[in-house]
Amino acid sequence: MTLSLLVILPLLTTIAVLLCRGQYTVRLLSFAGVVMQLILSFVLLALYWKERAAGNTAPMLFVYRHTWFTALNIDYHVGVDGISVAMILLTAFVMVGAVLVSWKITPMGKEFFVLLLILSAGAFGFFISLDLFTLFFFLEVSVIPKFLLIGIWGSGRKEYSAMKLALMLMAGSALVFLGLVILYYAAGGHHFDMMAFAQSHPAAAVQRLVFPLLFTGFGIFTALFPFHTWVPDGHSSAPTAASMFLAGISMKLGGYGCLRTVLMLAPLAAEEYSPYIITLAAIAIVYGAFATMMQRDLKYINAYSSISHCGFILLGIGMGTRTAITGAVMQMVSHGLMTALFFATIGMIYDRTHTRMVEKLGGLLKMMPFIATTFVIAGLCSLGLPGLSGFVAEITVFMGSWQHPGGAYHFATILACASIVITAVYILRATGQVIMGPVKDPHYNGLADATWNERLAGILLVAGIFAIGVAPFWLNDLINK
Amino acid sequence: MPVAPYLLIVLVPLLPLVGFVVLGLFGRRYLRAFSGLFATGLVFLSTVIALSVAYDYYFISGAGPDSVYHSAKVLNIHWLSFGPDFSIDMDLLVDPISVMMAVIVSLISLMVHIFSLGYMKGEERYATYYAYLSLFTFSMLGLVLSANLLETYIFWELVGCSSYLLIGFYYDRPAAVAAAKKAFIVTRFADLGFLIGILVLSFQAQTLDLRNLIQILGPGGQSLADALLVPGNKGSFLGISALSWGLTLVFIGGAGKSALFPLHIWLPDAMEGPTPVSALIHAATMVVAGVYLVARLYPLYTATPNVAEIILWVGAISAFVPAVIACTQTDIKRILAYSTLSQIGYMMFALGASGFTASLFHLFTHAFFKALLFLCAGVIIHRVHSNEMKDMGGLRRLLPVTHVCFLIACLAIAGIPPFSGFFSKEEILAVAWENNPFIYAIGLVTSGLTAYYMFRLYFSVFWRKTPAHEGLHHGEAPASMKIPLIILAIGAAFAGFIPFSRFITPDGRPGEAPAFGLNVIPPVFIALLGIGIAAWLYGKESNRPEKAAKALRGLYTFAYHKFYIDEIWLFITKKIIFNLIGRPAAWIDRNIVDGFMNGLASATAGVSAATKGVQSGKVQDYAWFFFMGIAGLAILFIYLYT
């Protein structure tokens, strides 16, 4: 299978959307594009399984390589393993949801969809890149449009938030780039080939030098403490679809980058630095959860809880046992789906009630049972209810973390486990006030439940959450084999 | 060992799951009026299958030639793997305990399903109610049949979730929402212990399969077991062995679900849920999950006497304290809730005192009489439209069937022969006597208190005064509500005659039924005394109760306010956790961490503002810089070279 299709298809859709007129055509084209992308992702999954079942044990499948810039040894080099396939599936799912919930976006619907599609092209390109330069290129593609999406269609202090997000993510990119340049020169190869680095790791001194740069750089994307502060402001000001992309996919770009750094580029340094990673991850998990407890705005609640949940990704990566890393990837997929669903429902609630403040909402279950139910499902997934994806991801991280023999590591694991109680507190507090309880405002009584496009988005994401939660073995095997 | 016959047991949890999925997706729109019958039909099938499997297991094929009951695993679905040779399968365990529990759960659930047909009739969210009830039944059956500890934990959480949904069923009542939240969070807090316990045990044993776990870690097992038991050895912490840690943590999980002291605070509040739900979840099935969990790992607990000691004392305190509180409460459902707490305490300390069979026997009989009490309370509340004891009185003529059933249940719980509770409680007390006379004394006193508060309730509801609403004669209750009462009353009256120790023993070997001798005299005497006092105080309308309360003023207020345990917890959560951790965390994040980031940004902006004047575009400025630069360099060179 030509992996490049994954990038070409969104770009073609973007061009088609740019060329056409009329709000309706724009929507339909964007929708058709993301649905085709989803189908393509499933085809990729099927083909990947077929290859693996046939006994192909190459580390990367469907590899394609083409020289891009000879002078600097930069190639367009793509290929996938189970982890990339999982991330691609996640991206495709979230994108369909994001397009569906932005169905009636105004003003400038066309520009909105164009930017969203470019973002997705960047994400897909990122997940298939095996050349570090192309990887970095796609990372940038999926940052800059976010600035515009928040600045133009956002709410609240949108200029401030857009600027903050862009600057912090750019700082992360700069660190990553610095790390890559050092790798390029100091590792002795004068190349950006990730697979070559994976086969013969850079010298220990180089690893020690580049690891903090790469890990912090990617870490900023995935809310590494204390560089997480763009998350609450960025998410809460972003329009619904951008929040979904931001939390669902963009934060996973960082996690994926950290994972590749640990596994392929600097495994030796990763082991040395693991106490620091784990400490920061444990802080993010517990501190993020406590900070969530005090939030009054639904989007802030989900943003802070994302900091806590992304801590599990970093914890798993930092622990470095095979099970913990599997758990980290599962958590990326699970958190992506869950948080996208959460932001989608929060957006639906906001569209109707024009508020996101917990104390102003109440009794939504009465007039919008569908939205309320999806909200509760997202919440239950967040607090790790078995049967939903959050549980399997977290338990795999916990089990894997405990397999690390160090005593202090057990302590970090216990701290991480303790967050399940705090999560329950803030999720149930929010649910109790927003979804249950008496109807706060008589105006809410006339509000309508979800429209067909919102329902479709909700059902899709909920289906993904259940597919992992009820039958986790497929994802587990996909990542491991 | 033939496995095929038990394959049918897969249907026992699966049918309610079908009910949940169908009603959850289509119930509200398409099945409205039929949803009750639909769910009840599925649970009925479940019950029939459970009974047939039980018959097959206990009487035909379960025991081997040595007449020892063996266990069998049914189904084997690879679910998740935690490493190359450590995977979690979804499978069901068929052994004496799980089959017994499956029968109880499905039977009580069926009774509650039938009862709800009448009780919840006309409710707007009728279909949703049955969907939740089916979800609970599925989860609970999955819990009792699960074959590995992680699977147990999975269903354990699902049970908690369905309990949350059902307590908060009347979601527009703030009290119900708060109670649901409290129940979930308190049990979640305890489940944290369970989870870490699982991590500890699995790390040491590299398996979570219950049978393997017991084999590997149990007494007389392998060298690993002996190694883990020694403090200071592998995995031990703070001088306590790894095994003790793991088992204590698992027990904490069980203590939360079973609402043992001091984690009991969620159960009385949980009475905000519909009454049939209280009967099913918060009396007969879910709250005994902790007892079940400890019984499941019983061989391991016997190997760690220090943990067994903890269980013994926690159980004894949990039996006694709620019984005292129950004597002062006035809400009928809350009295029953405290009585549930106390009875679970009995089951727990029996396990701590090596009374495996006695404990499960009491679990079995308690399921009948406690479910019956709650369903009777449902009829009463349905009729009087109040939960308060003062709004009742003299109802025996209005509700004759309920009256008889309630009386049977009261006699059973008070331990009056020949009702079921007598046999099981007697076994527990016998075990306690052998183990620790002090615990026996607590059990004995609690038994007297139990008789007192149950009959205090009985007399206040059915006797005391002539009812004000005698004229309104609607008939007692629909048949759908009366039939479950009668069936459960038969169980509550006669379940004690089942030779329980023939089927349920720690090692599967049929045991001897305990013989009753003179030792039955003290408990029965104390129970009769309790009933007598209750009759004297509450048999007729009088001011005796107030006088008694006044005489015991200090103790009475203390007990009436539930020993202020709720307030202590509230203080810890609201004052300490929210104010000392949550608020500072949120503040630090916005002001210090983010402030630092913003400071970095404004510092950058400041530097740029300060330096941007340099590039003004004015030629005279550049000439000035040029001149100054030359001058500066000249001074530098002169300084350096002279």
Image (cartoon, coloured by chain):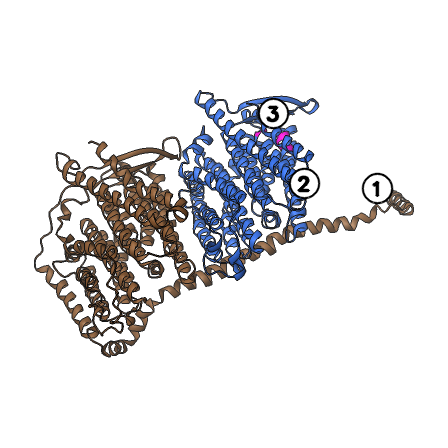
Residue B641: x, y in percent? 86, 40
Q: Mark 1 lies on which chain?
A: B
Q: Quadrant of the C terminus of chain A?
A: top left
Q: Distance between the residues labelled 3 and 2?
A: 30 Å
Nearer to the camera, A301 or B395 = B395
The quarter of the rendered structure image containing the N terminus of chain A is: top right
Amino acid marked by disc 3? His
Spatial CA span between label 1 and label 2: 63 Å
Disc 1 on helix, strand or loop? helix
The correct choice, above or below, for B553 with respect to A46 in the image is below
Foreground: A221 or B618? A221
Disc sitting over residue A111 in the figure: 2
Q: Residue B445 placed where, x, y %?
A: 20, 65
- Amino acid type shown at disc 2: Glu
- Which picture quadrant has residue A168? top right
**Foreground: disc 1 or disc 3:** 3
Marks 1/2 same chain: no
In the picture, which chain is blue? Answer: A
The range drawn in magenta is A128-137
Q: Picture coordinates of residue B96 (x, y %)?
A: 20, 42
Instruction: Give the chain letter at badge 3.
Output: A
| Element carrying mark 2 | helix
Q: Mark 1 points at which residue?
A: B640
Judge from the rendering whether residue B504 lies leftward or rightward of residue A151; answer left or right: left
Q: How far apart are marks 1 and 3 (CA)?
A: 56 Å
For label 3, the residue is: A77
